[in-house]
Image (tube, rainbow, N blue to C red):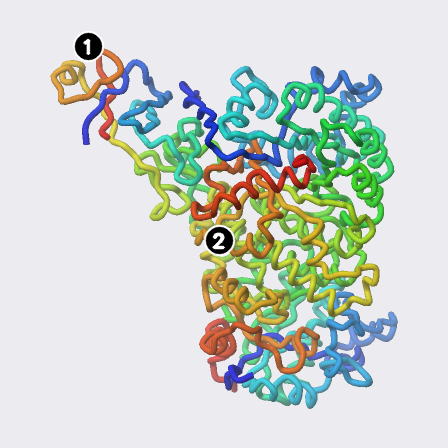
Amino acid sequence: MSIIHPGAIDCDIHPAVPNLQALLPYMTDYWRDTVVQRGIDALESISYPVNAPITARPDWKPEKGRAGSDLERLRREALIPFGTSTAICNCLYGVHLLFSEDMALGYAQAVNDWIAKEWLDREPKLRASIVVPLQNPELAVEEIERLAADKRFVQVLVPVMGEMPLGKRIYWPIWAAAERHGLALCIHAGSSYRHSVTGIGWTSYYTEDYASNAQAFQAQVTSLICEGVFSKFPNLKVVLAESGFTWLPAHLWRLTKFWRGLRMEIPWVDRTPAEIARENIRLTLQPVDGPPSAGAFERLMEHMQSDELLLFSTDYPHWQFDGDEVLPPGLSSELARKIMVDNPRNTYSRLTETVT
Amino acid sequence: MSRHVVAPVRDLPPGSRKLVTVKGRPIAIFNIDGELFGILNRCPHQGGSLCEGRLIGLVESDQPGEYRFSRPNEILRCPWHGWEFDLRTGQSRCEPDRIQVKSYEVAVEQGQNVCEGPYVAETFPVSVEEDYVVVEV
Amino acid sequence: MSVDVLERPVAKKAQPAKIAVADCDIHPSPKSVEKEIYPFLEKRWQRHLETYGMIGRQGQQFGPAYPKGQPDASRRDAYPPNGGRPGSDLQFMREQHLDPNNVQLGILNPLRGGQALQNLDFAEAYCRAVNDWQIAEWTSKEPRLKASVVVPYEDGALSAREIERRAGDPNFAQVLLLSRTGEPIGQRRYWPIYEAAAEAGFPVAVHAFGYGGNAVTGSGWPTYYIEEMVGHAQCSQTGLTSMVMEGIFERFPKLKVILVEAGFAWLPSLAWRLDKLYMRMRDETPHLKRLPSEYIREHVWLTTQPMEEPEVREHLLDTIEWIGWDRLLFATDYPHWDFDDPAYALPVRVDAARRRQFFFENALKVYGLDK
């Protein structure tokens, strides 16, 4: 791990809500009461079956309870080994699964207040994402406005699969609010299961479900660019979290090729999609769905045509790598530093602001 | 560079187009409302025959959801992959600075001038009574 | 102002020196359904077609869900001079494509074959008619062309029956499915298709497109045609994932799958991802005995069109190396608008042996026509 750089910024860790009881103090009376009255046990998504190997690396899994639910362990396992100066918490609790917009807001508020109090207040190295009720863009904006003054929130968090492609104009008030407040938009693996995770129906195996996030990300890159999100919000940075990055070059080749002939359908896209992606889109490092050889990995980095796209992540406590082998073979020290320090700093304007 | 007589004007009425070969180069000539344009008949992408493309207008936008349509029939769309080219400049719409098709000066000359030269009229006799389409190659 | 093409460029003359081409994706159309399909369709289904039309899993009665970029999704120069849809005139196809591009083997992929009609009995009857039509109008008249067995793929048993009917018929080279199935294409309702195809020695080609009722993305329906176009590649990725994870290559060891018109540059990344996930969770799919990438390497081919076009063209050669030069089958997609011209498909520095593989030999091998 000699090329680990001091001051690493980990852009994707997952503190876990240990159980629904933990959120109750952060709920309004009404929503707290519904938990009891309606017998709501938990909001755990099938995107991460609690005992699946992806969900918790074996040596990071506590004997009891959820991996990632203990701050002390998180310090010991995720922050210290990688010399991490800052880590961004993406809480994957299943707020996005709910159908009631109001209930989603109730839970989103609870998750956000819980993370501020239980994690950010207790560990100054931590930053967090604002969980929003994407079910209703107006309410999502409301939640961003409520928390925007707290500079420890550095981005807005949405799942890669929801009701509609994320470039759709119905979502634009949310992206406008994010841009206005200097927040990035983090699109994270996972689905609200409004549709089958593939374009051809529901899968048989969890392996397929998890694998399909990479295709879902490709579709969202298409949507964001073709709908003109970056023409409208040129300063918005979008971070694609936890689905690899080796798919990006081939996807941009295809999208750019078709754009040359179909540009008149989306005339606001006035630069190549590849160029727009390189300017506005970033991807977290883990999982590295990389080629087995270092030589091929180097070629692939060339295909990316930019060394500014990748952001360091451990994806703690998900099992993406063993030991401390968080960086793929074939990275130069220079590129490692960019990924671990420079690129995250350039992506998250709030990281360089003073937090009070 | 030399000037080549490629057709009598009456063969290229407004709204028509013609494929000619000058110095071995296939050149597509268009008459758009009386104005003449010439481009190399080979899309810089995969060689699609541009004289078979549709003429469309210029589609521009200042922001998503806005469509501005102007200069009808001055943009040529390749019949294969739909790449658009500005007939006035040869520039592509997708990447105007990087991707262009060669464009040629096309003019109308009186038969009198044509007969006196220095024009090259390889394929047909010219007469003083007619006007001719002339391409500079 | 209506503008007509006054003059066509002279068709490129066939040059014997030009490399031989196998075009693994040509789209034939009937001149008219009444004239060319009806002779093979029972009266009952003719009446049904006239009364109810072709009802599938999309709302438009006459046309695609997303209007195409050009009429009939076709090259503007592919309309036969004697009328009819692009791809409906054999003589013009010879003059415009087969002869000048030195196509020595052309695989016909009819896309309006009735494969995905909701009414399964109608689908079966229509598919059978389209198969008969391919022989009558195409392969019996032009020995360079081979047909595809189109099947009502949402019903495995009916499809298997049609495959068995065509087994051993040298007019046919493969079985054709569309990629946008109603359920992931590796699932067991489709297994009778793979079993019958493997038994008959037909590769199964899966052509991008179709309507299975699911949104083209895992996050719902996009807005623009370009998104649907690009989205077919993602659907084919999940389709291949399904085939591998369901273990169809373990169950049908002779099965060959050809992914058509969905791009290919995404394959290495997908295979790396699947290998990694399989190693992590192999207890979930104990029916698999090998790495996903190994099944893919042995059982899967991809047609090339539309070739991905990186800004740095050489990047694509890395990708082809990772996939294997023996896995790609050249295709033009004639007469469709995103046609790839063989003259432009590969960068010049690719050597002659690889060119022969890429343009011709791989196809002969996969279709068993090299013997």
Within 10 Å of disc 1 (Cα), the crowding (few <14, some 14-19, many 20+) is some
Chain of the residue displaying label 2 = A
Q: Amino acid at mark 1?
A: Ser
Within 10 Å of disc 2 (Cα), the crowding (few <14, some 14-19, many 20+) is many
A73 relative to B124 in the view: left or right: right
Could you tell me residue A16's position as x and y percent?
72, 78
Residue in front for this viewpoint, C370 or B14: C370
Name the residue beneath numbered marker 1: B127
Residue in front for this viewpoint, C157 or C215: C157
Q: Amino acid at mark 2?
A: Pro
Is circle 1 on the same chain as circle 2?
Answer: no
Could you tell me residue C128's position as x and y percent?
79, 26
Could you tell me residue C324's position as x and y percent?
60, 52
Residue at (31%, 24%) from the top-left corner?
A: B21
Name the residue beneath numbered marker 2: A273
Chain of the residue displaying label 1 = B
Residue in front for this viewpoint, C314 or C15: C15
Picture layout, residue A266 above or below residue A39: above
A151 relative to C175 in the view: left or right: left
Q: Of discs 1 and 2, which sits in the foreground?
A: 1
Where residue A139 sits, quadrant-wise, is bottom right
